[in-house]
Image (cartoon, rainbow, N blue to C red):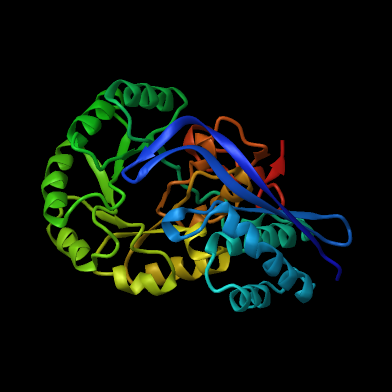
Amino acid sequence: MSLETEFERVALPLEYPFTIARGTQTTAETVVVRITDGDGTVGIGAGAPSTHYGETVATVAAVLPDLLAAVEDVGDPHQLARIERRMRETVAGNPAARCAVSIACHDLVAKRLDLPLHRYWGLDPTETVETSYTIGIDDAERMREKAETAIERGHGRLKVKLGTDRDGEIVRTVRDVAPDATLTVDANEAWTPREAVRKIDRLADEDVAFVEQPVPAEDPEGLRFVYERSALPIAADESCVTLADVPRVAGRCDVANIKLMKCGGLREAFRMIHAARAHGLEVMAGCMTESNASIAAACQLAPLLDYADLDGSLLLADDPYEGVPMEGGRIDLEAERPGTGVRPR
């Protein structure tokens, strides 16, 4: 089978500046991949690299020619296992780059079969979840406005970024605006273990559902310390990057947060989900600030999840791609679009 491949770098402005404990972002930089078969069917994927994991759009663009050459050499997009193996042999790191190709291949395969990707996997589209909507760090009034906007748009789950000297004020501000919303918080590794335990005790009074990545990933015993003393459930994000990390965080958290851009593709994400279940963990799928060119693929995993944090495309000022409908945050797979559900606007 003849396959043609191409990619392009795309910069997407955010609706609001997005601040977490590590810094502020105003633009989401992605690399979009297209794989076209001999009949003209196009599979679309995208990589949203994170410098936190050693990737940039430049490094993604640098390795994609070799990754796509491996796909062309295999020739058959349905040989997903072989393609994944060849990509790992070609480029050991660069998970966002490998993920972009993985998504495009899966999109192409499902489109060739005229099936939504979740149907290709045998998943039930009615067993879906609601994504959270993230409120980035800002001054109190601005965070209030963001929360009000999210509630007006129908979002019932809000994720609040913390990691400042005014974390309590931030949560109280959002809770005041959204008294009935389900709140989760994410410290992005900003706290020490003892600080985390103290802050979590106070967060419990604000009816927070769980706390994500309270301490640095480089401190697994600190994560265990917090987990054993926390008044709230703990989710591991930066501590849970690939399949090998799942058994390491078991006994140190309640929820494994799996991101396609961290793990390198959809097949690895599947393995991580099943491994997390085997270790008694709940499962969340998260994202970077991304286009629907990649978010749509993560949404296809919804029937396997307990929680979703797949709002990356919702944070954009404009997205050149449509994806899975998420009116009010509900991931709606019943639209039954072939492939991942992505299509150019």
Q: How many marks?
A: 0
For the N terminus, the quadrant is bottom right
Residue 100 visible in this rendered orientation of the protein:
no
- As drawn, is 229 to the left or to the right of 42? left
For the residue pair 131 and 160, the one nearer the viewer reads as 160
Q: Is residue 182 left or right of residue 225?
A: right
* Residue 245 visible within the image: yes
The x and y percentages for residue 89 are 61, 79
The x, y position of residue 258, in whole percent, is 43, 59
In this picture, residue 292 sits left or right of residue 231 = right
At 25% from the left edge and 24% from the top edge, which residue is drawn? Answer: 176
Q: Nearer the viewer, residue 151 or 7?
A: 7
The quadrant of the image that shows the C terminus is: top right
Residue 178 occupies quadrant: top left
Pick the residue in front: 233 or 70.
Answer: 70
Q: Quadrant of residue 152?
A: top left
Asked if residue 17 is positioned above or below residue 96 in the image, the reply reads above
Residue drawn at x 59%, y 43% as measured from the top left: 291
Residue at the spot 56% in from the left edge and 33% down from the top edge: 13
Return the x and y of residue 249 as percentages of the image width and height: 30, 68
Residue with the most extreme right position: 39
Give the image location of residue 7, x and y in percent. 72, 54
Hey, which quadrant is residue 4 in on the image? bottom right
